[in-house]
Image: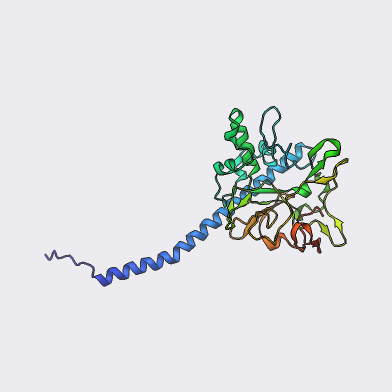
Amino acid sequence: MNSHKKAFTLIELLVVIAIIAILAAILFPVFAQAKVAAKKTACLSNTKQYLTGTHMYLADFDDRFPIIQYRNTYDANPLMPDQTVGNICQPYMKSLKILSSPGSSTGDQERDDTSPVPSSTRPAYQQEQLKFNLGLKADYGQNTQYYSVMNYCPNIGLIFMAVGTSQNEVNAPAESIYIVNSVWDRTSTGAPSGGGNWGLDPPCRYATGSIDTFPRLAGGCTGRWWWGGWNPGAPLAWNVWGGVWPYHSQIANTGFSDSHAKAMRIPMLAAGCNVQTAWSGFIFDRAAYLWDLE
């Protein structure tokens, strides 16, 4: 019996290696795209769960949307705790993880460390402060100017007073944005950092003819808090899009007040609005504009 074993030649080995390299070059981008798509889908699921929790809240609180924040102190002291919209809805969401997008690389520790009051500085109620900070850095920002007016009321002794919008005031819930993927800050190179942002500014305020589309201020209040609107002239600014951030290949998952969610690109989010710095542009097509209550 011939027991001689035939070995591979160098040429054959090189051919095999070349084939493997070609397959890897073809498949690795496919795998990467599949991973991005999976994260976008998981984030869209979070968006939907956030909306479901919000609608359960509405049923228990006279059909008023949750306010953006209680006291503007950023302190979870149990004697007078501050809370954000994401914390307020936790009894209905049952998980703080819903507030974090799988598309964001920011972990809980960074969200906590970069908060105005890190939990490490509040050892007496560290866990409560951490929960607050994770709500503050939620990757799903509320359309605050329309759904939770942040009143500035020094004349009546209240520097900050948020008021939730009534569901009855939303005339087109399927065409009115409630939450969008958001960003807290950006590095000098423009990369997102610190997590998300619990509130957002819309791209426009006034419709053509100087019609103010924002809900009215509460009685005795003289102004409203805001984050500077959209800032298209500063492409590396955190609020270049009012705090919106497209975590998923230029796509930001968006939730509407009727509780449906969809993936949207920035131009779609700015439809009907001539975006200019600090709301100096006008809404020219209210039917296409998706941020107001009409």
Q: Quadrant of the N terminus?
A: bottom left
**42 left or right of 91?**
left
For the image, the number of numbered tags is 0
Provide residue 174's location: percent of width, then percent of height: 75, 54
State how the image is colored: rainbow
The single residue placed furthest to the left in the displayed view is 1
Q: Quadrant of residue 83?
A: top right
In the foreground, 56 or 144: 144
Provide residue 244's location: percent of width, then percent of height: 67, 54
In the foreground, 63 or 71: 71
Q: Quadrant of the C terminus?
A: bottom right
**279 left or right of 53?**
right
Provide residue 131's location: percent of width, then percent of height: 62, 37
Provide residue 63's location: percent of width, then percent of height: 79, 41
Q: Quadrant of residue 211?
A: bottom right
